[in-house]
């Protein structure tokens, strides 16, 4: 089995609704996303997938979150969301609690046109979540 891995990063804020600690506050991370692709055999060019191709799509996905506040849908009062929008803050709504675990699955599913083996999402240099089937 051949496995290649590429990564991209983005800066974004989040908060964990109902978290019994400091992470229920809005705070930021430099999120690092590592994607591994697998193949039993290589194409004629000797690659699983050209790094340039997967990197482009991964970077584009990361860009959608970059310098935004990631918000779990329904976790803020409508008037709070309205106030943030009125201030022209960039918001990214997701249908899940924005933990490293959920984000690793999100990237895994978003990149299904590739033979994805696994996704690792680092919240901090020492804390990561891993998703694979
Ligand atoms: N399994 C998970 N646990 C936690 C997650 C997560 O996504 N998956 N997320 C958080 C918070 O987002 C938090 O930002 C990370 O918390 P923490 O480990 O406290 O991070 P620090 O490195 O900043 O901790 P220090 O207090 O500086 O040591 C919480 N848990
Ligand atoms: Zn956090």
Image (cartoon, rainbow, N blue to C red):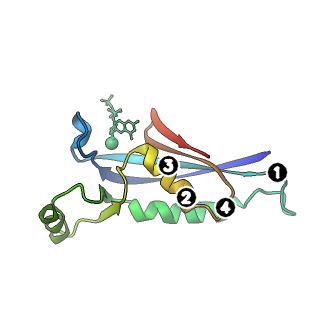
The circle on residue 40 is: 1
Cα gap from disc 2 to disc 4, whole angstroms:
10 Å
For label 2, the residue is 109
Tag 4 secondary structure: loop
The quadrant of the picture showing ligand 2 is top left
- 72, 64: nearer the viewer: 72
Cβ at disc 2 under 8 Å from ligand 1: no
For label 4, the residue is 114
Give the position of the N terminus as an image quadrant.
top right
Sequence-first disc among 3 and 1: 1
For label 3, the residue is 104
Cα gap from disc 3 to disc 1, whole angstroms:
24 Å
Q: Can you tell which of label 2 and label 4 is closer to the viewer?
A: 2
Cα gap from disc 1 to disc 2, whole angstroms:
21 Å
Sequence-first disc among 2 and 4: 2
Tag 2 secondary structure: helix
* Callout 1 crowding tier (Cα within 10 Å): few <14, some 14–19, many ≥20: few
* Callout 4 crowding tier (Cα within 10 Å): few <14, some 14–19, many ≥20: some
Asked if 107 appears above or below 2 in the picture, the reply is below
Q: Position of residue 55 (x, y in %)?
A: 60, 60
């Amino acid at each position: 089995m051949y496995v290649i891995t590429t990564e991209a990063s983005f800066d974004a804020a989040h908060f964990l609704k109902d978290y019994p600690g400091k992470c229920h506050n809005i705070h930021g991370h430099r999120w690092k996303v590592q994607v591994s692709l697998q193949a039993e055999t290589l194409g004629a060019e000797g690659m699983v997938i050209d790094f340039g191709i997967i990197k482009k799509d991964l970077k584009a996905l990361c860009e959608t979150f970059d310098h935004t506040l990631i918000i779990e849908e329904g976790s803020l009062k409508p008037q709070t969301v309205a106030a943030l929008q009125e201030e022209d803050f960039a918001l990214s709504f997701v249908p899940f609690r924005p933990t490293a675990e959920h984000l690793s699955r999100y990237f895994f599913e978003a990149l299904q046109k590739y033979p994805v083996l696994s996704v690792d999402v680092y919240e901090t240099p020492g804390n990561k979540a891993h998703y694979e089937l």
